[in-house]
Image (tube, rainbow, N blue to C red):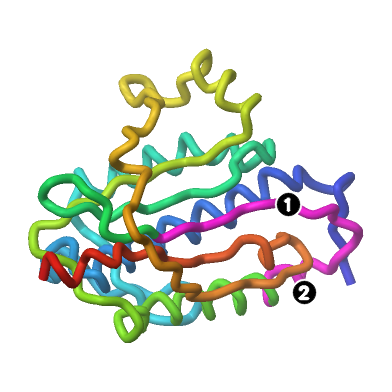
Amino acid sequence: MATLTRQDLNFGQVVADILCEFLEVAIHLILYVREIYPSGIFQKRKKYNVPVQMSCHPELNQYIQDTLHCVKPLIQKNEAEKVVMVIMDKEHHPVERFVFEISQPPLLSISSETLLSHVEQLLRAMILKISVCDAVLDNNPPGCTFTLLVHTREAATRNMEKVQVIKDFPWIVADEQEVHMEEAKLIPLKTMTSDILKVSHSQLFCTESQKLNEIL
């Protein structure tokens, strides 16, 4: 049985490819489940052997792809701490955040079959959890938008100012209004445990504003 070690592959690149592919699917599904865009712009596809909803809107898809393309080198170098999807109301106040915390463990030796099977099972479980997250979350107010934030380690932040992965798609410091949520409550959605990713620390959780009910 073939095994994979750090000497056999670029482990950081494998991690980055897997996580960015998953993040793309998760972001599209959250947009659908939380009704940020009309259901008509989504198409049903299959990923991780389960049905998912993916946007077919070119500009929306390009924004998501460009963001993740810029995030991938940070994950590859283990410089990204978390990716945060922020849903905002019409006044651009955050009402909801989906947080994906990321870290890499040492890789000893694993079989390629085990890697692919185990990771697919974990990602499938998380996608299924996102699909039904409406059951534990309040409805959002109408007219919401979203943005994607990346939390990096300090050294990475300095380097990002020098390196622009995509022309005309520069990194900018997040506005405090996009980051801060008043009276937020934490709702854990899913924690993954894996031999390839320290995904027990790569936790998906959602924070909601407790003022949301007052808005509605």
Q: What residue type is labelled 2?
A: Thr
Task: Give the residue at x 51% y 66%.
Answer: 204
In the image shown, does 213 or 58 lie closer to the viewer? 213
Q: Is mark 1 on a helix, strand or loop?
A: loop
Residue at image x 40%, y 75%? Answer: 130
Mark nearer the N terminus (1 vs 2) = 1
86 vs 100, left or right, is left
Q: To which quarter of the image does residue 195 belong?
A: bottom right
The disc at residue 104 is 1
Q: In which quarter of the image is residue 149?
A: top left
As for residue 69 lying within the magenta part, the answer is no
Q: Is residue 109 above or below residue 179?
A: below
* Alpha-carbon span between mark 1 and mark 2: 18 Å
If the image is split into quadrants, where does the C terminus sit?
Answer: bottom left
Q: Mark 1 is on which residue type?
A: Gln
Q: Against 110, is 17 above or below?
A: above
* Nearer to us in this view, 176 or 7: 176
The numbered disc on residue 114 is: 2
